[in-house]
Image: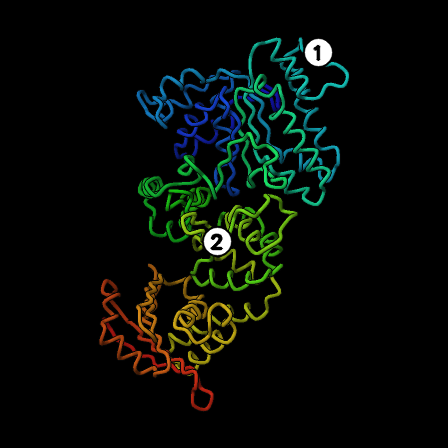
Amino acid sequence: MCTYVNKGNEGFKSAVKGTYIDKTGMIAIINQTLDTERRFTCVTRSRRFGKSMAADMLCAYYDKSCDSRALFEGLSISEPDKEINGIFEDKQYEKHLNKYPVISLDITDFTTKYDEEPAIVSHIQEAIIEDLITTYPDLTRKEGDDLMDVLVRLVSATGEKFIMIIDEWDAICREFEQSAAIVDDYVNMLRRLFKGGNSKKVFAGVYMTGILPIKKYYTQSALNNFREYSVIKPGKLASFFGFLPNEVECLAKRNSFSVEELKEWYDGYRIGDEPSIFNPYSVIEAIEGGMCSSYWSTTGTYDSVVTYINRNFDGLKDDIIKMLAGGRCGVNTTKFQNDLSIINSKDDVLTVLIHLGYLSFDSDKSECYIPNKEVRIEMTNAVEATDWKRLNETLAASEKLLAYTLEGNEDAVAKGIELAHDENTSILSYNDENSLACVLSIAYYFAKNDYVWHRELPTGKGFADIVLIPRKNINSPALVIELKYDKDADTAIRQIHSRNYMGKVSEYAGEVLLVGINYDKNGINGKKHTCKIEKIIL
């Protein structure tokens, strides 16, 4: 068994021995492309969202050097009369199972070994050729042959086309982003392999996966014969980009784990038509570790996030603030050239963060947002590492504001809201009820750690209603917060009673704090914000 050619099924064998969620249905979709005009596929998603596992699965299924029937037995791809994407897959399953010579690469094997070495592309080709010569002893190499020359000669001799699988295809583009010559050499190698006159003669199918879609040159992809699936445009592969709610529910039930807690920490990604996708890596880590925590974020670094958001293109800072407060921001994802060395606008930064998994993307509304608690913690860490001093002071003050509220310190709460209001008025117009509600979300940002938020913005001037319910095992009172505009805090408290806002916490039994906050643009003696806090027991 070689390193890159016909390397067998050990990777997938390890996966199915552990906690495995059946995603073999994706094989059926790839099978439909083999030996067709659509044989070139690129699927990109965030780190730790199953890229390598999918590559190992495809390698185990197609590789003729091993027998993987037992590995796939009982999984969806092997079920009799199983219809996937319009085809009864039991027939296709047998047709392609372990029938091809396979070349399987993880490009990070080379970026880590040949860091900053200009000849890295040559090393990749030579490594594969060495494996091919080992696998096919009768193969001869002529002077000046590159990898494609060797493959053409080999396929002509054997009559067998290859399946090629490339994991972390974009690692060179990411790691060598400042070395345009190396990136161009790499892309040209891929073009030589997959877009030349002999490509269809050599390959029955090609599958590439990574984080970034294929780099654009001007308005076209350098490999525009590839059908691309990404977190922004997942097409019919959306359900394979992470764990679905029913899959997480089964895992949680099997392991006596809280579905609600998993949802709070790891749900929130919208991928195409799938409105609810969980981070698969973090779900598995939480269940196997027995507790929810920040698992996905610890597998990488937020340094890159800091680098991007520190550029502070016009409006970027306000958008980050708004999303930290639970809001959404519009984004144009079409301008990004899929090149980390070319970041020209706020939209480019937000698009990169979507691909990296720090933001989720709603394609129907062209909006992005922070999906869950795990990512919110990581984004907060990233912001704290920037030079956004005033925002960092606001976030730090949020913890104190919650403490003052729970203590019933009305003057301190009013001052805290005023500080947040003054620091963040560029999000929306200052004298606007929506702006007040958004500012309140920022001011009480720290409370998101311990509370479930329910926010409403009823029509009519002067009020926004926010209800905070403590999470399980949090021994704190619920909060019902009402904002008024150019009235007074007592009026806000009376409205909470008259409109029975406490009904929103009817399922919560215990102490509730009613918090009325008023903003008076012409406040007496400059005191524009006032607060009234009332304690009740349900």
Residue at screen point 35% across, 62% down: 453
Position in image of residue 354 (x %, y %): 51, 49
Q: Nearer the viewer, residue 479 or 529?
A: 529
Q: Residues within 10 Å of mark 2 (few under 14, many from 20)?
A: many
Residue at screen point 62% across, 36% down: 108
In this rendering, the answer to whether 394 lies above or below 471 is: below
Residue farthest along the bottom direction in this orientation = 525
Q: Residue 212 sits in which quadrant?
A: top right
Position in image of residue 82 (x %, y %): 32, 24
Q: Nearer the viewer, residue 257 or 431?
A: 431
User: The residue tagged with tag 1: helix, strand or loop?
Assistant: loop
Question: Residue 140 bears which disc, if any?
Answer: 1
Labels 1 and 2: the sequence-earlier one: 1
Q: Is residue 247 left or right of residue 130?
A: left
Q: Is residue 107 left or right of residue 64?
A: right
Residue farthest along the right direction in this orientation = 143
| Figure quadrant of the C terminus | bottom left
Going by the numbered disc 2, the residue's amino acid type is Val
Q: Which residue, given by chain and number where applicable, does mark 2 sit on? A: 375
The answer to whether residue 291 is visible is no
The answer to whether residue 401 is visible is yes
Colour scheme of the picture: rainbow
Single out the mark in the foreground, 1 or 2. Answer: 1
Going by the numbered disc 1, the residue's amino acid type is Thr
